[in-house]
Image (cartoon, rainbow, N blue to C red):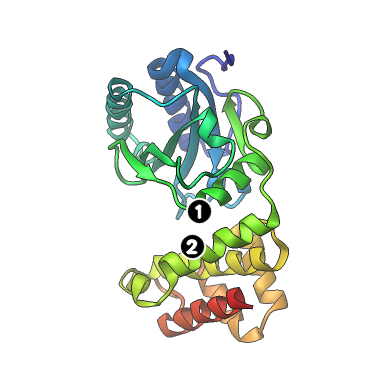
Amino acid sequence: MTTVLAPTMDHSTGHPDVDAALADLLEGVQATLGPRLVGVYLDGSLAIGDFSEHSSDIDVLVVTEDALPDDIVAALGAMHARLGAGATKWGSELEVAYIPQRALRRFDPDDNDHPCVERGSTEVYRERHEKDWIIHRYVIREHGIALAGPDPRTLIDPVGAHDLRDAVVSILHGWWLPAPACRRVLDNPFYRCYAVLTMSRILYTLEYGIVVSKPVAAQWVQETLDERWAPLIAAARAWSRDAAPDLDETLRFIHYTRQASER
């Protein structure tokens, strides 16, 4: 059985309120899961290095020894409800996936239905993971930070460039295209920023077969690709409602990314 850390968090994100939310989560997870817990890992922006208090959530992977019974899932729901009622916003900015160790090893489209909590909610529900979890596995394996448990490289098989390219193309065509699939949310200025930066990262992965932070990918687009996109990228990187990326130009950039995926 894997030995996990005591309910204290040695890692600091550099953001005290975020650290406090993570420490509360870690303590709650360890108290609720006990010996069922294998490890707790930072995912997403906190792992890959593009976290922003202005726009990011807190992505966390919790690895369990086996599938969780209903009573434990209910107890996790009560724990998340307590965190969400805390003094800071970060208790409800948690996005947590609970995955058994066996299922984490590699992405299996037939074995990918796991409990999770989404940003803005404290409800624990079962979600079917799509190919974006290939990218999550890559980020956690290569960049994930262990708050408890073993090195994530011991839990996840290597993720190759072909699989990453296949995953980003699947995401692109599953949500972003055709344009009407995401057109409604693009009226939100902040979501347009997210869209432009996500397209930048997709383009980078298509080119190099790895996943980097949104700022790194955006800078690469500005410096390497058609200069017409430079103002759009600059607006997206500012994350400002007052100077949000132009909607029509954002849709053109999504179309440009689709064309790149077809090549």
- In the displayed structure image, the side of residue 63 where residue 210 appears, left or right: right
Kindly identify which residue carries mark 1: 131
Compare marks 1 and 2 and give the one earlier in the sequence: 1
Residue 183, picture quadrant: bottom left
* Label 1–label 2 contact, CB within 8 A: yes
Residue 250 in the image, given as x and y percentages of width and height = 47, 78
103 and 8: which is toward the camera: 103
Task: Name the residue located 42 percent from the left edge and 38 percent from the top edge.
Answer: 96
Which quadrant of the figure contains the N terminus? top right
Disc 1/disc 2 C-alpha distance (Å): 7 Å
Crowd rating for badge 1 (residues with CA inside 10 Å; few <14, some 14–19, many 20+): many
Task: Name the residue located 29 percent from the left edge and 42 percent from the top edge.
Answer: 121
Q: Judging from the image, what secondary structure is the residue with disc 1 in?
A: loop
Residue 237 in the image, given as x and y percentages of width and height = 55, 67
Kindly identify which residue carries mark 2: 171
Task: Name the residue located 58 percent from the left edge and 44 percent from the top edge.
Answer: 137
